[in-house]
Amino acid sequence: MSSKIEMSALTQHWVHSHEEDSETEMVFRPANYKFPPSRGRSSFELKPDGLMTESGPGPTDRREQSEGKWRLDAQGNLVFYDDPGDQQRRVLKIASADRSRLVVKK
């Protein structure tokens, strides 16, 4: 699937649009999308140089942020990993992606 995904579509700040989720998929929208009010949303920013920032509400409801790297693997998975050490942190299997909507399998 990675050959069908334009890297330029992925390199932006994505915010979880949990209202659009289904039983099998999670939906992310660009940060400038007009979201309805929510107590907190998880997000990640994918930068063109392979660096990424991930954030969301922590256990005390304060926003927590972490940094790392990202890549798109040969199977069309979005892989987040820690730097240094290149330890895999999270893998998101992309169902579809364009500049306005990113859908991943749960």
Image (cartoon, rainbow, N blue to C red):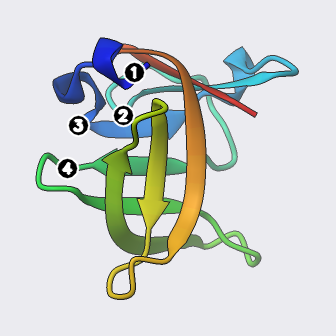
- Separation of residues labelled 3 and 4 (CA atoms): 5 Å
What's under tag 4, amino acid-wise?
Lys
For label 2, the SS is loop
Which label sits in the foreground, 4 or 1? Answer: 4
Which label sits in the foreground, 3 or 1? Answer: 3
- Provide the residue designation for mark 1: 33
Q: Is residue 99 at all visible to an observer of this figure?
A: no
Residue drawn at x 33%, y 49% is 71
- Provide the residue designation for mark 2: 31
What's under tag 3, amino acid-wise?
Thr
Expressed as whole percent of the image width and height from the top left, the position of residue 68 reads 35, 71
Q: Residue furthest front?
A: 74
Mark sitting earlier along the chain (2/4): 2
Expressed as whole percent of the image width and height from the top left, the position of residue 6 reads 23, 19
- Provide the residue designation for mark 3: 11
Q: Quadrant of residue 14?
A: top left
3 and 4 marks in contact (CB < 8 Å): yes
Q: Quadrant of residue 81?
A: bottom left
Report the side of 86 relative to 10 (left or right): right
Q: Against 4, is 56 above or below?
A: below
Q: Counting other residues with Cα less than 10 Å from the Cα at mark 2, is it few (<14), some (14-19), or many (20 or more)?
A: some
